[in-house]
Each structure stands twice: as C-alpha cells, then as structure tokens.
C-alpha cells in the first residue's frame, strides 16, 4: 500500500456504470443538487426504519447533511469512489424519491460493494430486489470486477434478505464495533457466487 489504509481500487480510470436505468414502475438516476429537499423528506419519512441501522441517520435530520451527501455523491462519480442512484417512481405525477442504492469502490481489487435503503411504504414490491439485481449485473460487467458484496449487521434481517434473494452467499461473519443503535456487533459479508 502507498502509505494509506485504503485498499487499491478496482475500476480502471474513466470506467463508470450507467447514470440511469428504467424499470417497470420505477427508475434509477444520479442525484443532483436540486434533490436535497426530496432526499431530506424521504429520510424524515423513513427515520424509524433507517435510524437503527444507518449511523448517519440521526435526530434531528438536517437538510445540510443531505446537501453535503449529494456533494459527496457528485465527487464520488468523478473519483470513481462511489456511484449513487436515487430510486424514483412517477405514477401519473411528479417524481417521488423512494430510496437510494449505491455501488462503492472500497473493498479492494476485484470487488465492489452495494449499499441501499428504501423508503417506508415502498417495501414489499420487489423494488430493491430488481434494483440490486440490475446493479449486481452492471457491476460484474465492468472491467476488473470479479465479485460484488453486500455488507450488513446480522440483526438487520430485512437488509440481509436482499442478497439472499439475489443468490449471494454468506461468505463470513465478523465481530464489529456497533456503529448504529440497532447493530448487534456482528457484520455479515454477502458475496456473489
């Protein structure tokens, strides 16, 4: 390593996934600075479900945090560190932000990690399964990517259900310092077969 604790990155310079994807009933698109209010509202509406598992989801939810996250998301695309998409639906009206899915270049050579959350009321319809399937297939088609991983706390059974549905296998479980109120202190590492 070159004096840092970060693992070498997977993607060759200039390689990025598509910025948009369309599905029946919803789509994925890159966030923009104009989305801060919609992101803020979605996090507030889903606070009870996010707070136990997401260390960044604290009370009170601050719009400045969402603006900063969008700025980091824009930088992530430029540096190839992370690629974030809003999950949006528009049924006969304005678009509604119903979640976020991300592809992160932080687990070392040959691998990318997927992270996600879905808004209260949008669960149970297969949205995250379809979005994570697309992102898994998209990631594995990128040069240099040999595996995709999903990490979650062992107590977060809803999050762990996604890689199970996608056919990922539980590669390992490791003790971890709890980062959020619901964390059990045992992290699961799911990996593509």
Image (cartoon, grey):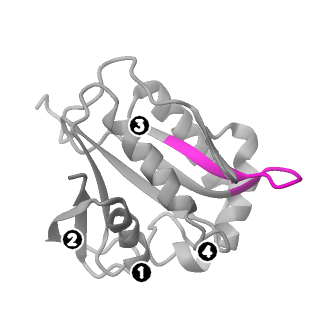
Disc 1 and disc 3 in contact, CB within 8 angstroms: no
Q: Residue at x 20, y 40 (%)?
A: 108
Check the image and name the residue furthest to the left.
Answer: 1
Q: Is residue 10 left or right of residue 162?
A: left
SS at mark 4 in the image: helix
Q: Nearer the viewer, residue 56 or 85?
A: 85
Number of residues whose C-alpha sits closer than 10 Å to that of mark 4, classed few (under 14), some (14–19) or many (20 or more)? some
Of circles 1 and 4, which is in front?
A: 4
Q: Nearer the viewer, residue 103 or 20?
A: 20
The residue singled out by tag 3 in the image is 138
SS at mark 1 in the image: loop
The residue singled out by tag 2 in the image is 176
Q: How far across and down, in percent of the image, does residue 101 sit?
A: 50, 51
Check the image and name the residue furthest to the right.
Answer: 93
Q: Which residues, given as a range, are shown in magenta? A: 84-97
Q: Is residue 3 left or right of residue 186?
A: left
Q: Residue at x 88, y 53 (%)?
A: 92
Alpha carbon separation for disc pair 4 and 2? 23 Å
Alpha carbon separation for disc pair 3 and 4? 30 Å
Q: Is residue 190 left or right of residue 66?
A: left
Name which quarter of the figure residue 59 lies in.
bottom right
SS at mark 3 in the image: helix
């Amino acid at each position: 390593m070159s004096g840092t604790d970060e693992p070498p990155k997977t993607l060759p310079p200039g390689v990025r996934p598509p910025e948009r994807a369309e599905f029946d009933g919803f789509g994925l698109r890159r966030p923009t600075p104009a989305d801060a209010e919609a992101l803020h509202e979605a996090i507030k509406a889903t606070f009870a479900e996010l707070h136990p598992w997401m260390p960044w989801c604290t009370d009170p939810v601050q719009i400045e945090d969402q603006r900063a996250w969008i700025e980091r998301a824009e930088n992530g695309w430029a540096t190839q560190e992370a690629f974030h998409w809003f999950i949006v639906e528009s049924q006969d009206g304005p678009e509604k932000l119903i979640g976020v899915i991300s592809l992160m270049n932080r687990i070392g050579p040959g691998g990318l990690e997927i992270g996600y959350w879905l808004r209260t009321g949008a669960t149970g319809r297969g949205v995250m399964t379809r979005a994570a399937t697309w992102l898994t297939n998209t990631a594995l088609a990128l040069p240099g990517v040999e595996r995709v991983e999903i990490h979650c706390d062992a107590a977060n059974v809803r999050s762990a259900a996604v890689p199970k549905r996608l056919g990922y296998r539980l590669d390992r479980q490791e003790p971890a310092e709890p980062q959020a109120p619901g964390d059990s202190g045992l992290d699961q590492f799911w990996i593509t077969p």
